[in-house]
Amino acid sequence: AFDRIREWMNRNKDNNNRLKAALTYQGGYCNDTPLHLIETPLHEILEMCPPVDIIQTFIEYAPETLQMKNVFGELPIHRACEYEASLKVIRALVNGFLKSIKVTTDCDHLPVHLA
């Protein structure tokens, strides 16, 4: 399932601007209405329990996404914990932004509360 994502990332790894723009895009839809700042692609992909190499590519090309909150105040680490990401993925996210483990959501949840 992740082969197409890997393939696209590999094809665009030399086009830093395009890859960074795709990885940092924040948008989405709620009830067919476009809303700004809903989720980043990193938030979305973490719902699918991705392999660590995909997450490492996000971190390498767009490390700022680790600090980007969604509309619910969740960082990617919150989403990873909520959707039971692998320990390797959790480690990669934490190593990329250590302070994330102490950040609460809009509902005052730490990442560990969602695990």
Image (cartoon, helix red, strand yellow):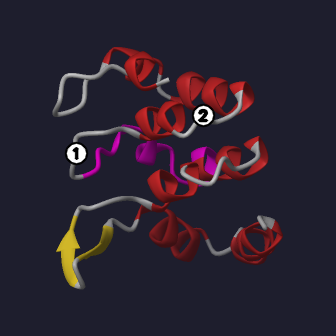
Determine which residue is flagged by label 2: 84
Q: In this view, does 24 lie to the left or right of 56?
A: left
Rendered residue at 44%/17% (across/down):
112
Image quadrant in which you'd find residue 26: bottom left
Q: Residues within 10 Å of mark 1 (few under 14, many from 20)?
A: few
Determine which residue is flagged by label 1: 72
Q: Position of residue 70 (x, y in %)?
A: 28, 50
Rendered residue at 47%/33% (across/down):
77
- Magenta stretch, residue numbers: 59-70
State the residue lying farthest toward the front.
31
Q: Position of residue 63 (x, y in %)?
A: 50, 44
Q: How crowded is mark 2: few (under 14 residues within 10 Å), some or many (20 or more)?
A: some
Which SS type dominates the magenta stretch? helix
Look at the image and say whether residue 53 sits in the magenta stretch: no
The quarter of the picture where the N terminus appears is bottom right
Which residue occupies the foreground of this view, 50 or 16? 50
Q: Position of residue 49 (x, y in %)?
A: 66, 47
Q: Where is residue 101 in the image (x, y as percent from the top left)?
A: 41, 17
Element class at badge 1: loop
Element class at badge 2: loop
Task: Tell me if residue 115 comes above or below residue 25 in the rendering.
Answer: above
Q: Sequence order check: which comes first, mark 1 or mark 2? A: 1
Q: What residue type is labelled 2?
A: Glu
Whole-number angstrom distance, CA of label 1 to CA of label 2: 18 Å
Look at the image and say whether residue 63 sits in the magenta stretch: yes
Rendered residue at 79%/69% (across/down):
10
Q: Which mark lies nearer to you, 1 or 2? A: 2
Q: In this view, does 14 lie to the left or right of 60?
A: right
